[in-house]
Amino acid sequence: MDKTHEKVWSNCLTIIKDIVEWQHFKTWFEPIKPAALKDKVLTIQVPSQFFYEYLEEHYVNLLAKTLKRELGKEARLEYRIMVDGGNEKNQPLTMDVPGHGYKTYSNNEMDFPLVISNPVKNPFVIPGLKKMQIDSQLNPIYTFDSFIEGDCNRVARRAGKTVAEKPGATSFNPLVIYGGVGLGKTHLAQAIGNEVKRSNPNKVVLYVSSEKFINQFQDHSRNNAINDFIHFYQMIDVLVIDDVQFFNRAEKSQDALFAIFNHLHQSGKQLILTSDKSPKDLEGVQERLLSRFRWGLSADIQVPDYETRIEILEKKMKNDGLEMPREVVKYIAYNIQSNVRELEGALISLLAQSSLNKREIDLELAKKVLRNFVKTSSKEITIETIQKMVCDYFDVPYERLLQKTRKREVVQARQITMYLAKLFTKNSLKTIGEHFGGRDHTTVIHSCQTVKDLMDTDGMFRESVMELQQKVQLAAM
């Protein structure tokens, strides 16, 4: 009894089902429909040109072997590709089963290389879908070299480096980078993608924000093209999705992400996700997705410490060919503590004011410009507080600060204390002088001028004053 095309394909599926993973079988073989069988040529119908290409690239040998087992060594496979709108006049493309990869196809006995005339709709609008033609959507300025490492981000950065060297081949899959706004999550995630592209140019890397992903899914859903959408993302080697917390308002998009995540992870592809919260704290995201987010490594990025903020500013200045006094850099780094984005914004504002007003950048200008960035002190600093700080810093007894002595270390400590008292308190010169053994206002004026002059000429002295100034500022917060 002759076999029907349904029976032949059913027998092939029975074999294939035992070989490939269940999710792969569901994605790539269940949608195929047997169409015809004639002279040991089995025609199968596939839902899209992309679907056909994917089968050719990944499963051509498996299809060849199973079909030969059913129909003998002369067996051949023919594809009938579904085209939107339907066109029965198209002759089906044919191929020799033993072929590997993309071959020459026959239509009306004329050989021609495969031309994608009706590709799956690429959400990123790159015409003619070919793997190497997919735009990564990465910003080339985001690299590891421009990402400053500190205690605040060391684990995340080093994990990112490991992933970039061996995408999909480490236990850091997925890599979830989480932290507050403006701390460098997007920078680090894209740095991984850029490094993969540099070292593995054949790998397909794609960066997408969760908002864009959701909008694309909704567009494809309205056009009844969800399968094309999912298939597109399933061909990516390294997928970076930014701000996954926004999936909490898109239930259907979560279903698509789940299918894409499963396929990529099971295929040994790399996923990199960013979020403003740890996966365990995400609300409105399906538990099955959250459990998969926790399969790999979750690494947080925290607010950079003072030293790291200085490094960030210096790196930014070096890249832009800028220079400014060290004391100004320290002032900015000390006062802008919220995130990297505000730190760079403060630097740009300062440079803009300097350029527009044709004025050299100094501490006075920095203070003026940074008023919009620096929060007003909630605590009132007293002269006594400053005196104690300076005494502790220079290891000078408090009573010596008030005595009449010409000892250099005591005189300088007293002058610096007066300078800081004038800078950080609302007291009059007369009141400040009275806190130093009843000295008059002219002594305070002289002391302040002496400190300014020494800061201009003595680098070590300036460092000491700036460090003390930062201590006072911290006490005021």
Image (spheres, helix red, strand yellow):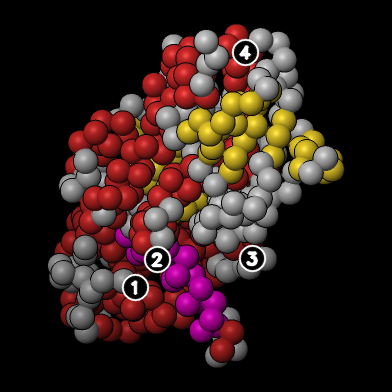
Spatial CA distance of label 4 from label 3 is 68 Å
- Which comes before the other along the chain, label 1 or label 4? 4
What residue lies at 73% left-to-right and 19% top-to-bottom? 98
- Mark nearer the viewer, 4 or 3: 4
Looking at the figure, which quarter contains the C terminus? bottom left
Crowd band around label 1 with a 10 angstrom C-alpha radius: few (<14), some (14–19), many (20+) = some
- Mark nearer the viewer, 2 or 1: 2
Q: Residue furthest bottom?
A: 357
What residue lies at 71% left-to-right and 34% top-to-bottom? 94
2 and 4 marks in contact (CB < 8 Å): no
Crowd band around label 3 with a 10 angstrom C-alpha radius: few (<14), some (14–19), many (20+) = few
Q: Could you tell me residue 57's position as x and y percent?
A: 64, 30
Q: Which residue is mark 3?
A: 320
2 and 3 marks in contact (CB < 8 Å): no
Note whether residue 189 is visible.
no
- Regarding mark 4 in the picture, which secondary structure is present there? helix
Q: Which residue is mark 2?
A: 342
Residue extent of the magenta highlight: 331-354
Instruction: Name which residue type carries label 2.
Output: Glu
Image quarter of residue 62: top right
Image quarter of residue 104: top right
Q: Which residue is mark 1?
A: 373
